[in-house]
Image (cartoon, rainbow, N blue to C red):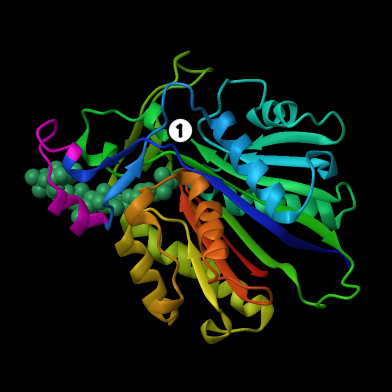
Amino acid sequence: VIRSIIRGTGSYLPSRSMSNSDFEGVLETSDEWIRQRTGIANRHIAGETETTVSMAEAASRRALAAAGLEPQDIDLIVLATATPDNTFPASAVQVQNLLGIKHGFAFDLQAVCSGFVYALTTADQYIKGGLAKRALVIGSETFSRILDWNDRTTCVLFGDGAGAVVLEASTGEGGLADEGVLISRLRSDGSHKDKLFVDGGPSTTGTVGKLRMEGREVFKHAVGMITDVIEDSFEGLGIGPDDIKWFVPHQANRRIIDASAKKLGIAPEKVVITVEQHGNTSAASIPLALDIAARDGRIRKGDLVLLEAMGGGFTWGACVVRW
Ligand code: ACO
């Protein structure tokens, strides 16, 4: 049996950060409102020379170093992003080039905030299918470039950043039989398009467009969708909330995370939270949180880690990984 195990993690955040109080005086908002409704205090914003590709490259190099591997060891790159550098070629191919890789293959994957869960599942299937041996799975986003900075209902919520993991084929020899990506559950429903979308695109307006969201509508659906796919994953593996060591959810809103954990019966001390410092970094939020929790010693070899995300589309999904 082939398993895809996580060999290393890496992340990158722009050095420029923006606190809630930086919005005060510019927009009719306050630190108190943003904190209370979202749990966000701070977010990082890409500088002029920082892009989805450059941040993805930096996160990937750190993940490779953590794994003790070279770029040449990689034969697949899946980059989850809704904010690519160009309409084409794919940002993943540009990362591949910056890493000096000329073998294997690379592509982008678009599932907005669920992008990393979709990308991890996709890379896992390529590895299990024998098409790749070692994959970089990346989430990288520059949402600052698609925000309407005059719209207080959206622009305070998002931030930029990137995270990456190295996924490697393992036959289980000398390792655990149940290691790596153990289960994935993915869903989508396009009838919710108008609740969270970008009002431009190459085939419609010929422009990039800006993010539009009915926040309250998204909120209303989030907890039910998230807990559904997680309960499905638990059932598939025959486990329960107590078996989970760490819950690493997509970081959109503290209230959604807390309500989901509570509904599932996952203890608050098992939840990894980065939304306070990063805001919502879309597809980057889970690999960023994984990297932080792996480097500070929380996530250790053998831990059962639950990942979950929900985003535009709607798309949603969950993965359970034995670290
Ligand atoms: N500062 C001050 N007031 C604000 C702000 C702000 N930044 N934004 C909105 N308000 C006002 C609204 O205008 C409204 O005023 P009104 O009552 O006079 O009309 C009031 O605050 C309440 O607005 P609601 O939208 O009802 O507030 P709510 O409690 O729902 O919080 C929020 C809004 C934070 C957006 C919440 O709905 C939310 O987090 N939703 C989920 C969004 C989300 O997580 N999206 C990401 C999904 S993942 C992805 O794919 C991108």
Q: In the picture, which quadrant includes the C terminus?
A: bottom right
Amino acid on which disc 1 is placed: Thr
Q: Nearer the viewer, residue 177 or 185?
A: 177
The x and y percentages for residue 273 are 40, 63
The one nearer the camera, 50 or 226, is 50
Question: Would residue 216 be seen by someone viewing this image from the given angle?
Answer: no
Q: Is residue 248 magenta?
A: no
Q: Is residue 228 left or right of residue 278?
A: right
Residue at position x 50%, y 65% in the image: 248
Say which element carries label 1.
Answer: loop
Name the residue beneath numbered marker 1: 142
Quadrant of the frame with the N terminus: bottom right
Q: Residue at x 37, y 31 (%)?
A: 144
Q: Is residue 169 left or right of residue 58?
A: right
Residue 26 among those drawn in magenta: yes
Q: Report the magenta residues as a range.
A: 22-38
Q: Residue at x 38, y 49 (%)?
A: 278
